[in-house]
Image (tube, helix red, strand yellow):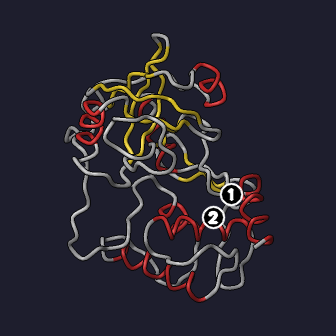
Amino acid sequence: MKKLLALLMTAVIAIAICVSPDGGALAMSGSNGRIYDKTSTGPMVVRIQLRLRELGYLNFKPTGSYKSMTVNAVKDFQVNYRESGYEMQVDGRMGPQSMELLFKYDAMRVSLGGISIPSGPKHASDTLVTTGSLIPWETVKTMMLAGRSYNIIDCYTGKEFKLQYTGGENHAEMEPASEEALADFKEICGREYNFLKRPVVVVIDGQTIAASIQCWPHGADTVPGNGVDGHVCLFFDGSYSNVGHLPDVEHTENIYKAAGQH
């Protein structure tokens, strides 16, 4: 366990992939052209395993060791792309092409056999009706007051509702300020709780700030009478997940979208 935690924390510094404003993957730290296979170990393997698990291809905790279950998960990922028309070699190795596709915002998830996945309303062209400024989370954190409600505007629909800021270290933890706000929140999320993430802007002291919201309430609940247990996560530029202190590629993509930089 200590070794795994060390790998997870080291991944924040030594990781070779980050998300660019155009949704692709940027190779850094000398990782250009590198191929990861069953001989590979280390923090980048942890990151690959985390992303495969997030997309549904892997069903065990990251180990930092590229063994048979990781190989099989990568093969499933590659098959998914090949069957969609990509010229993709299915070998279970994570080369430059597979790496770029894996870390794209719209990476293909595992096939769920016709199960319907909720999606919130948006324009067919993905046109945004509003955008905000790209401001670092560390700065935003000093601007927000715990217990105060802030207007949230969905970038796709313009729907506006209030969320109350309750705190958060790596990102903002917010709760619907009322049952009416909860109804508006659920509407942009496809009318049910799910793991969908959407670009939004937050109005703080008259300034609109780019952010990304997740449609899954969880954890601590501090606002009574709002019709929901738990809080929702709101990410800003530079926010991190509470798991492994790692960035979230989908939130990052949404934040750039909300800033008009996609």
The quadrant in which residue 60 appears is bottom right
Judged by depth in the image, the label closer to the viewer, 2 or 1, is: 2
Point out the tag, 2 or 1, that comes first from the N-terminus: 1
Disc 2 + disc 1, Cβ < 8 Å: yes
Q: Which residue is mark 1?
A: 16
Please tell me which residue is depicted at 50% across the width and 70% down the height of the picture. Answer: 53
Above or below, comparing residue 261 to residue 14 in the picture: above
In the image: residue 255, left or right of residue 136:
left
SS type, badge 1? loop
Q: Is residue 163 above or below residue 79?
A: above
Classify the position of the N terminus by image quarter. bottom right
Residue drawn 47% across the image and 49% down it: 250
Mark 2 lies on residue:
47
| Amino acid residing under circle 2 | Arg
Residue 198 location (% of width, % of height): 37, 41
> Is residue 23 or residue 162 the one in the foreground?
162
- Circle 2 residues within 10 Å: few <14, some 14–19, many ≥20: many
Instruction: Give the residue type that dot 1 points to.
Output: Ala
Q: Residue at x 53, y 83 (%)?
A: 92
